[in-house]
Amino acid sequence: MRARYGVPLSLAAVGAAGLVYAAGFEVRSFRLRRVTVPVLPRGMRPLRVLQVSDIHMVSGQRKKQRWLQSLAGLRPDFVVNTGDNLSDPEGVPETLDALGPLMDFPGAYVFGSNDYYGPRPRNPARYLVEKVQGRHGLNGNAPAVGVVHNPWEDLRDAFDAAGWVNLSNARGHLKLDGAEIALAGLDDPHIKRDRYAEVAGGPEADADLSLAVVHAPYVRSLDAFTADGYPLVLAGHTHGGQLRVPFYGALVTNCDIDTQRARGLSTHTADGRTSYLHVSAGCGTNRYTPVRFACPPEATLLTLTARD
């Protein structure tokens, strides 16, 4: 009897323990990733950029709120929010409360699909199969019946009132101690709201630094920004794979970027040019799949330094 049932029961116990860890501990084990990126002109002082992404706020997530508030203690030069702030239409006040201390700093933002539309319950196994097959969510189709429209306008108005620059298919500028930072961003390619023609043309010649920002790192967007000469692209959306296999990495990215670049700093090449790419694994999850494994929730402090 032991020989017959011992192994299956042991596997079931390991699986149950893994689920408890993924849903009960790691999903709330917030981390700060630190990255150095050499993209500044020689002689320019380093800049500290805090990237927050994929908060997916649900009402009642007090620990996440406190952790986000605590990031203001890093005193970044500016903040970049790469979208998907919401996973609950009632979560706007708590999102703004969590980000309130960070909104005292200069900043910029783009939105993701979950800022516009609420998530729906889905079979996790089916989700994984679809992503492995290359099927990536709404893909620009009209939202299905029953999809909740999130109050993204309230987020936009609050961010704008704080002075954060809206980069949804737009350009913008930040001035920091005499330094001119030029920014270009896209609305979410995951739901085909990106309109690159509205920001095309490449970095501004008189800017000290030019950055590109997008929620979902679809290859078409990365190609466009890189070919235009942006030295650094910031993105989110992937959750770092959310469920990663130790010593292997992410299984899916929920877009057409390869899994090796699902999180962290890498590069992207297009038309003979190469840009740095930083993809945040984000600090939240879809409210219906609140698990992470080998992929803790994160924000990133990027220290931009002079080029070699």
Image (spheres, rainbow, N blue to C red):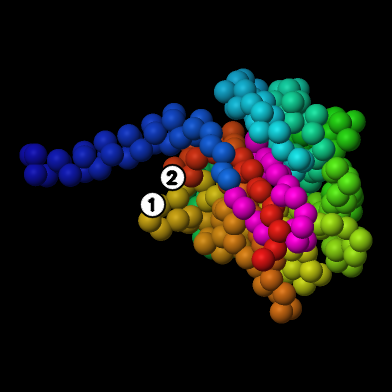
In the picture, which quadrant includes the N terminus?
top left
Residue visible at 21% across and 40% down? 10
Residue density around tag 2, few if under 14, some if 14–19, many if 20 or more, within 10 Å: some
The answer to whether residue 71 is left or right of residue 101 is left
Identify the magenta region. Answer: 35-57
In the picture, which quadrant includes the C terminus?
bottom right
- Where, by quadrant of the figure, is residue 275 drawn? bottom right
Give the residue pinned by disc 1.
246
- Where, by quadrant of the figure, is residue 20 drawn? top left
Q: Nearer the viewer, residue 12 or 156?
A: 156
Amino acid under label 1? Pro
The answer to whether residue 91 is left or right of residue 121 is right
Residue density around tag 1, few if under 14, some if 14–19, many if 20 or more, within 10 Å: few
Q: Position of residue 256 (x, y in %)?
A: 62, 63
- Where, by quadrant of the figure, is residue 67 drawn? top right
Residue 178 position (above or below residue 218): above
Q: Residue furthest front?
A: 43
Res. 140 visible in picture: no
Res. 2 visible in picture: yes
Q: Position of residue 211 (x, y in %)?
A: 78, 56
Report how far apart the C-alphas of labels 1 and 2 lie in the structure.
7 Å
Residue visible at 17% across and 44% down? 7
The answer to if 41 sits in the magenta stretch is yes
The answer to if 162 sits in the magenta stretch is no
Give the residue pinned by disc 2.
294
The answer to whether residue 133 is left or right of residue 139 is left
- CB under 8 Å between callouts 1 and 2? yes
Residue visible at 38% across and 56% down? 247
Amino acid under label 2? Ala
Q: Secondary structure at mark 1?
A: loop
Q: Nearer the viewer, residue 55 or 59?
A: 55
Residue 174 numbered tag: none
